[in-house]
Amino acid sequence: MRKEALYSGKAKTIYKTDDPKQYISEFRDSLTAFDGKKKSEAANKGYFNAQISKKIFEMLEEEGIPTHYIEMVSGNEMLVRAVEIIPIEVIPRNIAAGSITRRYPIKEGTVFKRTVIVMDYKSDEYADPMMNEDIAVAMGIATYEEIAHMRSMALKINEILVEYLDKKGFALPDFKLEFGRVDGEIVVADEISCDTCRLWDKSTGQSMDKDLFRFDKGDLSKAYEEVARRIVPEIFE
Ligand code: TMP
Ligand code: ASP
């Protein structure tokens, strides 16, 4: 079923399958941060992120949000629709953390009254510079309609995720979405996991996401396991 690799990124490898409309996305244990400058591995990270992503994609589909997710083919391999990725990271921000506190005079922990949507151009070479609709159209990577659609999908997904994660005991300061085109529609692609979200434990305020690795703040595998226990308890039965 799994054929040759099409593309290997920093944390996942995408493989072709017998069906040109479907790919397999393999979640690996490798970890990188700061545009690939910091590298490591964490035991079971690929498995936990794949399972968390699967659960979130299924939940979003139930809420009427289209995603590339089809089904799991193993613990850390996901069958997905083959999409054309739009190289824009769409980041809903609810509480200030990370790059927005470095690039602008906004203090970490500031709660935004209105969700801030940041769009970045996905490029290690250019260090993910800020994107807007005029630049995207000038570069020919997306249309005005697509940018507006991604923005409204991101706001809707944010609302759903904040409520969902709140019930599991997490605050969601921010997270990153990628979208792809397939059969004339725009669907959520890539992953939604501890690598692509900031998750803070509501009772302790502890980071339970990739910031543990970025800033050497603690045991990443243990934290990801705890997130998986709350989001996909069935895999521990
Ligand atoms: P940032 O504060 O570094 O811009 O990150 C915002 C959110 O996006 C955070 O939840 C981590 C996620 N993110 C990715 O998933 N991939 C990336 O390449 C970057 C820079 C951030
Ligand atoms: N800079 C990204 C991050 O810190 C990841 C990367 O570019 O390797 O999440």
Image (cartoon, rainbow, N blue to C red):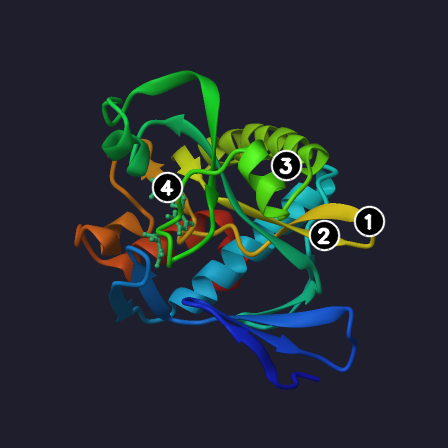
Q: Secondary structure at mark 3?
A: helix
In this rendering, is residue 221 above or below 171?
below
Residue type indicated by callout 3: Met
Among the two numbered marks 2 and 4 on one chain, the one whose residue lies closer to the N terminus: 2
Asked whether mark 4 and ligand 1 are closer than 8 Å, the reply comes as yes
Residue 126 percent coordinates (x, y):
37, 53
Most foreground residue, 214 or 135: 135
- Give the residue pinned by disc 4: 198
Judging depth in this view, the residue of 131 and 182 nearest the camera is 131
Q: Which residue is mark 3?
A: 150
Q: Residue at x 46, y 68 (%)?
A: 9
Are the residues tagged 4 and 3 within 8 Å (C-beta)?
A: no
Task: Give the labeled residue for mark 2.
Answer: 181
Give the image quarter of residue 111. top left
Residue, x 19% and y 50% (percent of image)?
Answer: 215
Q: Earlier in the sequence, mark 4 or mark 3?
A: 3
